[in-house]
Image: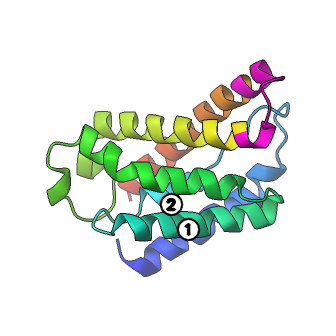
Amino acid sequence: MNWLRYIGILVLLLFLQVFLLDNLHWLGLVHPFVYLWAILLLPVELPRWLQMLIGAAIGMIMDLFTHAPGIHMAGCVMAAYLRPNLLAAYVQDAERMKGAITINAIGMGNYLRMLAVLVVVHHILVFMLEAFTFSHFGYTLLQIILSSLFTYAFIVMFELVRKNT
């Protein structure tokens, strides 16, 4: 994927996140974070520090729009940090891979498993930092589960649409 196309997808995802998904109030429990797909689409051959830097920039943009100082940034940096490890865990020849992590590149099963782990870890970090207490652990856990499911569904849908175009 060329950088111009990647930047276009990133801007579209951030626009969708900030102006549509963040303004939908689904019982206060469901918060899909589709911008996470942009971290997954980063080229595999990028060094980890650059992936983490790009993740930090994406998270900082989200933090600026959501008035959540550092919460999304922490989640994005963690996702970018874990991405190469997850790729190596789920894909045999990960070190020979080029380009973005897609269904075509690593297969449907590997993609879905890797995405599930990435989404759940990101959401656990974001929602636990946001709550910053265990006094409402049940509510926070419900937010993590429902938001992870919706984020997962949106990203899989986006990936399937992208795959077919």
Q: Which residues are magenta?
A: 129-141
Reading the image, the residue beneath label 1 is 10
Q: Secondary structure at mark 2?
A: helix
Res 38 label: 2
Q: Residue at x 45, y 75 (%)?
A: 5
Q: Residue at x 25, y 45 (%)?
A: 88
Q: Quadrant of the N terminus?
A: bottom left
Q: Quadrant of the C terminus?
A: bottom left
Q: Nearer the viewer, residue 114 or 55?
A: 55
Answer whether labels 2 and 1 touch (C-beta < 8 Å): yes
Residue 127 % position (x, y): 71, 38
The amino acid beneath tag 2 is Ala
Q: Residue at x 33, y 52 (%)?
A: 84
Q: Nearer the viewer, residue 116 or 27?
A: 116
Q: Splitting the image into 4 quarters, where does residue 124 fall?
A: top right
Query: Is most of the magenta stretch helix, strand or loop?
Result: helix
Determine if the magenta segment contains residue 137: yes
Left or right position of 149 against 23: left
